[in-house]
Amino acid sequence: MSTALTELLGVKHPIIMAPMFLVSNSKMLIAGINNGIAAAVPALNYRTDEEFRAAIDEVRANTNGVGLGVNLIVNKSNPKAPAQLKTCVEKKVDFIITSLGSPEEVIKQCKPHGIKVFCDVVDLKFALKVQELGADAIIAVNSKAGGHAGPMTPEELIPLLAEKCDIPVISAGGVGKASQMEDVLKLGAVGASIGSVFIASEESGVSNEYKQACVDYGAKDIVMSTKVSGTPCTVINTPYVQKIGTKQNWFERVLSKSKRLKKWVKMLTFVKGMKALEKSAFSATYKTVWCAGPTIEHTNSIKPVSEIIKGLTGEQ
């Protein structure tokens, strides 16, 4: 299928394997790109620049050279952003997805090198801002996305952005099978950024317990929690999540409202939450905090990435 997304990235299918914190790895990216889709990884998945560069080189060496992307957190919470951007430019990745901040500097540095810049947006106001800055496409993060979801449904957000914006709209959220892929294209999207259905892939490096949870739980088991990063984030409603609750306690809420302390409280909440996610993702523990979106409803077994792609494109 040819769309503006396949033309922008030179891939067969209008799909991006979404960048997932802790989950995305080189094996998944290689399998995705070699099966006709684009694939992105969060730069923050690598502790050092050396590891980050090595991962880009590994993917390049084992694929046909198109469709490799990186997700950059571009606000002040990520002090590594300037160095990560420098690496992306030097390595000439195919595209960058920006999140949680202004993409101005990313666009400025990437344009001369032909690196595409796609920007996460949750509303029309920010979409128009990034379009004015020169973004190549917008990623419409809707209410069915995994992780930090947006407030609007796909049915509300995609047509709005497609009508009001002059650059392509890529949907993020709510696509876990071929018919849903067709739905977002009919709404005006040129493709979809898809993450949760790839968690339970054979190539994924997370624990078997995390993968099996994506098989055993479904859309009704996804809840929003503010205890992970300080902002609403979708997690699987495991017994442990039920035990600790999904909202900050009264003391945390009071601290979060303090003008003097809220920045530090949010930072500490984020660090604590990320450590909990990392421990849950890679080891068996009763303290299970697994991030996923409602499209795990369509995960019925642990499969190779190639089979998951066939389910999304209707080729099986």
Image: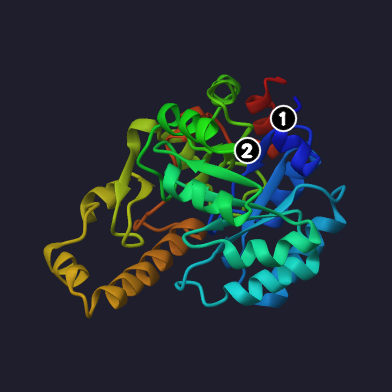
Q: Nearer the viewer, residue 240 or 176?
A: 176
Q: What's under tag 2, amino acid-wise? A: Pro
Q: Nearer the viewer, residue 38 or 294?
A: 38
What residue sits 76% from the left and 49% below the top?
30
290 sits left or right of 188 in the view = left
Q: Quarter of the image holding residue 306?
A: top right
Q: Nearer the viewer, residue 105 or 257?
A: 105
Q: Nearer the viewer, residue 285 or 6?
A: 6
- Asked whether the beta carbons under mark 1 and mark 2 sit within 8 Å of each other, the answer is yes
Rendering coords of residue 272 (x, y %): 36, 70
Does 85 appear above or below 187? Answer: below
Q: What's under tag 1, amino acid-wise? A: Thr
Does 293 appear above or below 60? Answer: above
How many labels were placed on the picture? Answer: 2
- Tell me which numbered mark, 1 or 2, is placed earlier along the sequence: 1
Q: Residue furthest bottom?
A: 260
- Which residue position holds label 1? 3
What residue sits 50% from the left and 47% below the top?
128
283 sits left or right of 135 in the view = left
What residue sits 66% from the left and 69% below the top?
85
Rendering coords of residue 165 (x, y %): 55, 38
Residue 178 seen from this side: yes
- Which residue position holds label 2? 168
Rendering coords of residue 189 (x, y %): 58, 31
Q: Quadrant of the C terminus?
A: top right
> Which is in the foreground here, disc 1 or disc 2?
2
